[in-house]
Image (cartoon, rainbow, N blue to C red):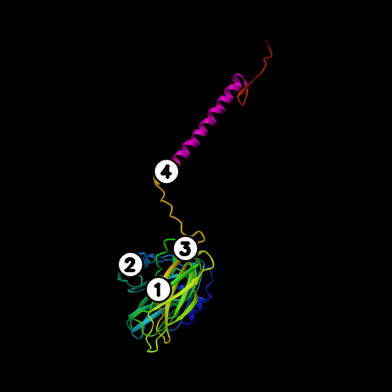
Amino acid sequence: MLTAFLLLTITPATGQVPNDDIAQRLMLQVEKPIASSTTNCTVQWQCVDERLTGKCIEYHNDQWFEFTPSVSGRYFVNISGQQCRDTRGVQLVVLTGTPCEPATYRILSCTSLGSQDDVFVPLEGLQAGQVYLLNVDGYLRDYCRFNLAVSSIAQGLPAASLPPAPAAPSASRLVTLRWTLPDSIDSIARFRVWRREAAAFRASSQAVVEVTRSTYGTAASAYSWTDTVTAPGRYLYQIIAESEDNVAPVLVQQQWFNHSQMGHQAPKPPTDARQQATQQQKQWERRASRMRRHRISAQIDKTTHNQFGRVSGNLIYFQRSSTC
């Protein structure tokens, strides 16, 4: 296992990790992270089937891992330390089946991160002795270095799909977040507010809101927090519930906030393709007409010069004959 880890960490940036080949997939052990990179990896198309994951993932530069738990139960795949060429980060697919036989695959989890945050993906009800395959791919060809670990403890933010983008920008720099205490979680101690600008690599912690309780120990159900953004942009806010023990953090709410100094503007009407084609046709016709006029003018100029003299503007200068 140590040899495999060293191979990954000393592989040159221009090369490929050995587990680019599914036959050389790396064996993961609980609580033992492995460092790897998607740079210059390829895809063994006979070993994947994008129809199984739908729109969740497109394979570009994947690599393979394998995990066999010795104890049944809940596990977490922790992805950390991402350093990527682009913003997008990596994608993770967890499945069962015979390696490189897509007809036998059963997808357990498919995650596209879209950022370089440290995140975890929960895997419920894994069975002891069952082989699980993990496929990691650079999101839309992103080249990433990352750490991967299977653990009994979640680390980072819960991996989640992004919410719909806001419909219109706001001229105000103030955004107020409101949320409620989930009934399904008893041990929440606090909420942490995370914020990430759309083009940023990672989210940053903005505030901690403690759970308030009455003198009888009853927790308040409604909470709010107001932020002031300092620059125009699209900001993703996530409210994460945290506990004092090792209970995995829970995503309570996430939303976008779009700030623009221009404020709300009425959307432009959609471009009519026929109108655009007509305008283009008119431009071509005007251009062709100018070219025809230029050719005709040049022909007249040449003919007039040969027959009568030299043409300049609207005047003709006749050459005097040598004989009268």
Measure how far apart labels 1 and 2 are at the Cα level: 29 Å
| Residue 16 visible to an observer of this rendering | no
Looking at the rendered image, the disc whose residue lies closer to the viewer, 1 or 2, is 1
Give the camera-side residue of 200 and 258: 258
- The earlier-in-sequence mark between 2 and 4 is 2
Asked which quadrant contains residue 278, the reply is top left
Q: Which residue is mark 4?
A: 277
| Residue 223 visible to an observer of this rendering | yes
Res. 88 mark:
none
Image spot of residue 59 (x, y percent): 41, 65
Give the camera-side residue of 238 and 123: 238
Provide the residue span drawn in magenta.
280-309
Looking at the rendered image, the disc whose residue lies closer to the viewer, 2 or 3, is 3
Say what amino acid the circle numbered 2 marks: Leu
Image spot of residue 120 (x, y percent): 42, 77
- The earlier-in-sequence mark between 2 and 3 is 2
Image spot of residue 312 (x, y percent): 63, 26
Q: Residue at x 49, y 80 (%)?
A: 3
Circles 2 and 4, Cβ within 8 Å, touching? The answer is no
Q: Main secondary structure of the magenta part?
A: helix
Residue at the far left: name it: 104
- The earlier-in-sequence mark between 4 and 1 is 1
Q: Which residue is mark 2?
A: 52
Say what amino acid the circle numbered 4 marks: Ala
Q: Which residue is mark 3?
A: 170
Q: Is residue 253 left or right of residue 297?
A: left
